[in-house]
Amino acid sequence: MIFVFHLLDRPGAAELRQTIRPEHRAYLGAVAERIAFAGPLIDETTHAMVGSVLAIDFESRDAAIQWLGCEPYTKAGVYASTSVHAFQNLWPQRTGFPVQ
């Protein structure tokens, strides 16, 4: 089942986010084949990263929560709030892909 992670940064976490980002990306890379979509939330005015949205296939909610607990941004204290929801994708994605 796909689980969506809605993760909002704590105020003042921008520098820490950048420092931890290589570890975060490597951690995501380990589950790359199971990612439906993933990316940062951005401030509309400054375009600064303010959180993350991830949609990843896990065997259970417990597995998703365990994965999040070991995620580098989580461990470093980047996030002020986290929520995890089961998700059913009923619409094929046709936009939002990075330019190659």
Image (cartoon, rainbow, N blue to C red):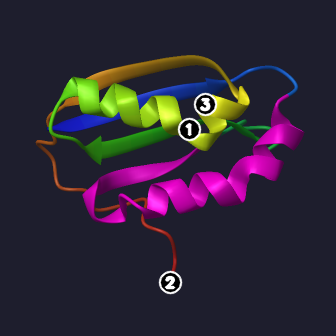
Identify residue for label 1: 52
Report helix, strand or loop for mark 1: strand
User: Which amino acid does the dot numbered 1 rest on?
Assistant: Ser
Residue drawn where x is 54% and y is 27% of the image: 7
Identify residue for label 2: 100
User: Is residue 21 shown above or below 66?
Assistant: below
User: Mark 1 or mark 3: which comes first in sequence?
Assistant: 1
Residue farthest bottom in this picture: 100
User: Mark 2 or mark 1: which comes first in sequence?
Assistant: 1
- Cα distance in 3D space between marks 1 and 3: 11 Å
Residue drawn where x is 83% and y is 39% of the image: 16
Q: Is residue 88 left or right of residue 30?
A: left
Q: Residue 41 versus residue 55: which sits nearer the camera?
A: 55
Report helix, strand or loop for mark 2: loop
- Can you tell which quarter of the image residue 78 is in? top right
Of tags 1 and 3, the one toward the viewer is: 3
Q: Is residue 36 left or right of residue 72?
A: left
Residue 92 locus on image (x, y percent)? 17, 55
User: Mark 3 or mark 2: which comes first in sequence?
Assistant: 3
Residue drawn where x is 45% and y is 32% of the image: 68
Report helix, strand or loop for mark 3: helix
Identify residue for label 3: 74
User: Is residue 65 shown above or below 34?
Assistant: above
Marking on residue 65: none
Residue 15 locus on image (x, y percent)? 88, 41
